[in-house]
Image (tube, rainbow, N blue to C red):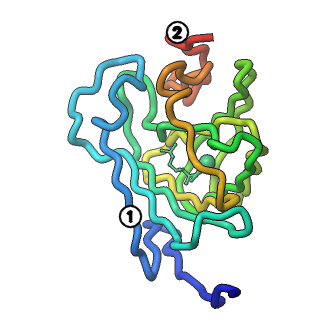
């Protein structure tokens, strides 16, 4: 039977949803091994994901807000783990609601594209591109993601290989540099 139409309310500043039944918290401890430098305080909060509850099937659109804290580990700005979709060709759209950052995308062959994230920008992430959000600002980076319901997550590939590039604080702001730890 068809689902019932519904609406959620999104707070653009905090990413909170109403209703907000499925909230996932990631701490720096969950990003152990992801940064070039060692993590000082594994208890620090890194990001929160608020999911809209819909069956995760290929005929539905899943959506969520992500609230990524500002901060750095060594010279690297806080980022999300990043993933390929388990079904590789599943696409996704990110609409930034507040804050500023960079969306780093990578193909399995190591090619990367980096795009700006700021309020009002809708980033299109085609299938086959791993994606990671990086908060280069001083306030939370909040964005709304919409994706095909059966996309799923492959975290292992990024956990093992890393992204080909890292985003660090340079003399004149954020710089995208080759990742010395990338496993090509
Ligand atoms: C998704 C989206 C997005 C993402 C979060 C957290 O496929 O669901 O890309 O909601 O999951 O921003 O990032 P990680 O899933 O990489 O931890
Ligand atoms: Ni995704």
Could you say which is closer to the camera, residue 29 or residue 157? 157
Percent across and percent down for residue 176 are: 61, 23
Q: Which mark is residue 23?
A: 1
For the N terminus, the quadrant is bottom right
Q: Is residue 165 left or right of residue 74?
A: right
Q: Is residue 165 left or right of residue 27?
A: right
Tags 2 and 1 touching, CB below 8 Å: no
Task: Identify which residue is drawn at 71% across, 56% down.
Answer: 93
Q: Earlier in the sequence, mark 2 or mark 1?
A: 1
Q: Report which quarter residue 74 is drawn in.
A: top left
Percent across and percent down for residue 137 are: 49, 44
Disc 1 residue crowd, few under 14, some 14–19, many 20+, Cα 10 Å: some
Percent across and percent down for residue 55 are: 58, 70
**Label 2 to label 1, Cα distance in Å?**
33 Å
Q: Is residue 2 left or right of residue 168?
A: right
Percent across and percent down for residue 133 are: 56, 42
Secondary structure state at the residue bearing disc 1: strand
Name the residue at the front extreme.
1
Task: Identify which residue is drawn at 52% across, 62% down.
Answer: 65
Q: Report which quarter residue 25 is drawn in.
A: bottom left
Task: Identify which residue is drawn at 38% across, 32% down.
Answer: 72
Location of mark 2 (residue): 180
Disc 2 residue crowd, few under 14, some 14–19, many 20+, Cα 10 Å: few
Could you say which is closer to the camera, residue 180 or residue 141? 180
For the C terminus, the quadrant is top right
Secondary structure state at the residue bearing disc 2: loop
Q: Which mark is residue 51?
A: none
């Amino acid at each position: 039977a068809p689902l019932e139409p519904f609406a959620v309310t999104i707070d653009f500043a905090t990413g909170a949803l109403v209703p907000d039944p499925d909230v996932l918290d990631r701490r720096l401890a969950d990003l152990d091994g992801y940064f070039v430098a060692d993590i000082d305080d594994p208890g620090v909060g890194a990001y929160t994901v608020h999911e809209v509850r819909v069956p995760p099937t290929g005929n539905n659109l899943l959506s969520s807000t992500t609230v990524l804290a500002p901060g750095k580990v060594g010279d690297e700005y806080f980022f999300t783990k990043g993933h390929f979709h388990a079904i590789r060709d599943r696409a996704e759209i990110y609409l930034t609601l507040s804050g500023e950052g960079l969306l780093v995308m990578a193909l399995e062959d190591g090619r990367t594209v980096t795009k700006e994230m700021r309020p009002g920008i809708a980033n299109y992430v085609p299938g086959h591109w791993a994606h990671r959000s990086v908060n280069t600002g001083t306030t939370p980076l909040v964005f709304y993601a919409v994706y095909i319901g059966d996309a799923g997550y492959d975290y292992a590939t990024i956990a093992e290989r890393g992204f080909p590039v890292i985003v660090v604080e340079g003399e004149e702001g954020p710089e995208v540099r080759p990742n010395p730890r990338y496993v090509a």
